[in-house]
Amino acid sequence: MAQNTIPESHRDLLDGEFATLATVGEDGYPHLSEVWFVTEGDQIALSLNTARQKVKNLETEPNCTLLILDLANPYRYLEIRGRADVEPDPDLEFARTVGAKYGSDLAVHDAPGDRRVVVRIVPARVRAVDMSG
Amino acid sequence: MAQNTIPESHRDLLDGEFATLATVGEDGYPHLSEVWFVTEGDQIALSLNTARQKVKNLETEPNCTLLILDLANPYRYLEIRGRADVEPDPDLEFARTVGAKYGSDLAVHDAPGDRRVVVRIVPARVRAVDMSG
């Protein structure tokens, strides 16, 4: 089932803690990593350090994909494709919003001079999968 | 830590049941799905139905990436990039090898006339992540 909204059957996955973010590198390879996220309606928002390869990839290719897996039942997941909208977070206000969800200071491992951005992914195509039936 | 072999610290993940396969579509978006896999040394091998979008993507762009997540500790995972080597599996011999791992008949949901291929991913770059420390 493909659409651009997240169906009721899979909305509980938005309460999860981990998403797999896939960006595409200049070498053509998908770059995958686990990320923390918060939701703003159907949008997924991430706080990322601009020194990371995934942010560099998004600057040249904003089309990206998130997979949110039901860790207790990996036959069930959401695949969300969308364009990444990247905005600066100079005062780390958004990083604190994400940190509040996880009880963590996101910037604690950032190096001096590192910058953080808000990456918002507006769903263009949502695939809700459940192969556990 | 990036290399082209799978380090001892993460080899247990090869005993897992699920991997996230990322291919790149003609629209530039990464396509992500959960797949079953078996290992042949450091190679990961999949049995895929050629009707699936991921196989079509691999035919035009064989560079792909697998993420194998520790479902019990999602701070720990392997990201494996490599070129997909796709070979026919006309007698479904390899599909049965994968099916033996999962106690399942992979072809049971295939439509009449569907074909299966063996997709082997030879690691070109392995990133072993553990952020749980």
Image (spheres, coloured by chain):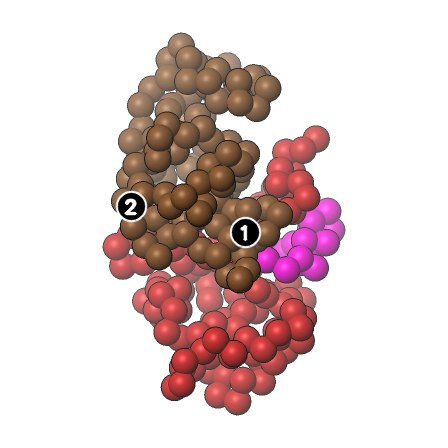
Chain colours: A brown, B red
Instruction: Count how many numbered circles sit on residues in the image.
Output: 2
Q: Position of residue B97 (x, y in %)?
A: 63, 78
Q: Magenta region: which residues? A: B4-18
Of badges 1 and 2, nearer the viewer stands 2
Label ID, residue A4: 2
Q: Which residue is pictured at 54% across the width and 84% down the height?
A: B92
Q: Which residue is pictured at 42% across the width and 13% down the height?
A: A93
Q: Amino acid at mark 1?
A: Leu
Visible in this render: residue B80?
Answer: no
The residue labelled by disc 1 is B67
Q: Position of residue A38 (x, y in %)?
A: 45, 28
Helix, strand or loop at label 1? It is strand
> Where A88 falls versus A123 (above or below)?
above
Q: Are marks 1 and 2 in contact (CB under 8 Å)?
A: no
Visible in this render: residue B51?
Answer: yes
> Where B124 falls versus A109 (above or below)?
below
Residue placed most toward the observer, B44 or B16: B16
Within the image, what quadrant is residue A1 found in?
bottom left
Q: Which residue is pictured at 33% across the width and 19% down the height?
A: A88
Residue placed most toward the observer, A7 or A110: A7
Q: Amino acid at mark 2?
A: Asn
Within the image, what quadrant is residue A57 found in?
top left
> Where B62 falls versus A78 (above or below)?
below
Task: Identify the chain of the residue marked 1, using the numbered disc in the image.
Answer: B
Q: Are marks 1 and 2 on the same chain?
A: no
Q: Is residue A106 left or right of residue A122?
A: right
Magenta stretch containing residue B8, yes or no? yes
